[in-house]
Amino acid sequence: MIETVIRKRIEILCDKALQKRVTAAVDRAGITGWTIVPVTSGKGREGLWREESVMGTDKVFVLTIAAEEKAMALAEDLAPMLTDLGFILTMWDVEVIRGERFD
């Protein structure tokens, strides 16, 4: 039977123009990898929105998986940006194979 370990999956929704600030925070937390996924539209508290490259408000998800300590360090680092810049951060437990890749 394959063994799995619990890690934290973290998704950060931010403006594309700010993605480097997020990936820098991921690096500072000691997390070894991340993936950026473009987001084309959505709906939130303030209603519908869609990608708007001309206005510079297109959005991305920065995705990563990490051990809990590193995930919490990342959340602490990004906390001021969540309010100031309107980022959304979600985090939950996931089971991964080869957990050493996500320490």
Image: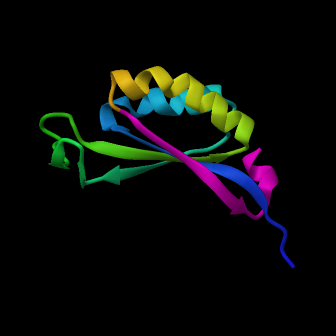
Q: Magenta span has 24?
A: no
Residue 42 percent across, percent down from the top left: 25, 53
Q: Residue at x 58, y 25 (%)?
A: 76
* Residue 94, horizontal then vertical, whole percent: 66, 58
The residue closer to the viewer here, 86 or 45, is 45
- The residue sitting at the left extreme is 54
Q: Residue at x 75, y 55 (%)?
A: 6
Question: In the rendered view, how is the structure colored?
Answer: rainbow
Q: x%, y% of residue 47? A: 16, 47
Residue 17 in the image: above or below residue 6 = above
2 vs 73: above or below: below
Report the number of numbered marks: 0
State the quadrant of the N terminus: bottom right
Q: Quadrant of residue 55?
A: top left
96 within the magenta span: yes
For the C terminus, the image quarter is top right
Who is closer to the viewer here, 59 or 6?
6
Q: Is residue 55 left or right of residue 72?
A: left
Q: Quadrant of residue 45?
A: top left
**As drawn, 25 above or below 9:** above
Residue sitting at 76 percent across and 51 percent down?
101
Q: Residue furthest front?
A: 45
Give the side of residue 14 with respect to residue 3, left or right. left
Residue 11 position (above or below residue 24): below
**What percent of the width, then of the height, locates residue 100?**
81, 51
Nearest the eye: 1 or 100:
1
Which residue is found at the position 35% from the left and 21% from the top?
84
Determine whether, in the image, residue 44 is placed left or right of residue 19: left
Bounds of the magenta span?
87-103
